[in-house]
Each structure stands twice: as C-alpha cells, then as structure tokens.
Image: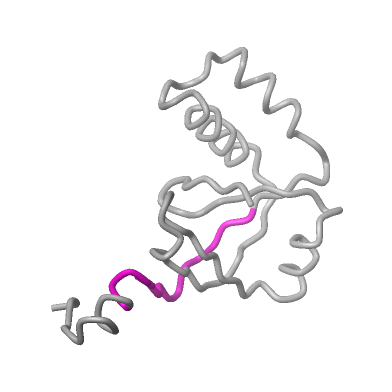
Amino acid sequence: MLYMVIDGIITITSTTNRAKYHAWRRNPAACFCIWEPGNIGRQVTLRGTVDITQDASLLRKFTEAFLTMRNKGEPPAEERLAEEIAKFDAPDRHMMQLRVEKVLTHDLNKLFEIETTGEDVWS
C-alpha cells in the first residue's frame, strides 16, 4: 500500500470501490507494519484508528509528496503536479490518515543475537 507522511501523519488515498475503504468504514482500527528497506527483520508496527475524509488540499499534499519522492527529493513542476492530481481527482476519492495510538518495534537480528550469545544486547 502506498503511503506518504503528510504533516507528520501516515496518509493514503483510495476510492470507494476498494476493500480497505469499506473495511475502515465498518471498523477504523488498523495496524500498519513498516519494514526497514533491505532488512525485513527490523520493523515498526503502528496501531491506531483511520480517519477518512475527502479533502482536496490533502490530496494535493499527498500527490506532491509522492512525486517528490519519485523524483529523488526534487519537487514536481506545477504543471506535472496538476496533471497527476487530475488523474487522482474523482468524486469517490477519499484520504485516509492513521491516528497512531501505539507503536511496537521488532528487531529480529537482535533477538537472534540474544538467542545465540545469551547476552542482553538491548542495554
């Protein structure tokens, strides 16, 4: 699932024909598990509640952040941004933001080290 961090909040977008939209409408509880690139053993799980809204300014911020990421940190030209927003802009487009209530981390490499050496590597 593509997500962007907008104003410090994990944000995704979807239309009403997607399962995640209907699932979060029924029950907004969610867990997002994010892995460290190149090291699946290191991850963070964010538990919380998903807020769903239709918000043109949030869609613009999301699209701009996505294009900037794809362009290795270089913001898109206004024309390119407008083209991409036009692709996403639909009457059934919604923005979802995870309101984080709990953070859990997991470091499999450290757990294996403790298991094999018996030393407490967390201190």
Residue at image location 37% in from the left, 72% down from the top: 108
Left or right of 29 on screen, residue 110: left
Residue 75 pos. (x, y %)? 46, 22
Left or right of 74 on screen, residue 91: right
Residue 117 pos. (x, y %)? 20, 82
Indicate whether 62 appears above or below 19: above
Residue at image location 56% in from the left, 71% down from the top: 31
Left or right of 29 on screen, residue 45: left
State the image quarter where residue 67 is shown.
top right
Residue at image location 18% in from the left, 77% down from the top: 121
Does residue 123 show up magenta in the picture?
Answer: no
Residue at image location 62% in from the left, 75% down from the top: 29
Q: Which residues are magenta?
A: 96-111
Indicate whether 6 appears above or below 36: above
Residue 80 pos. (x, y %)? 61, 16
The residue closer to the viewer here, 67 or 38, is 38
The residue closer to the viewer here, 17 or 34, is 34
Residue 50 pos. (x, y %)? 61, 65
The residue closer to the viewer here, 105 or 6, is 105
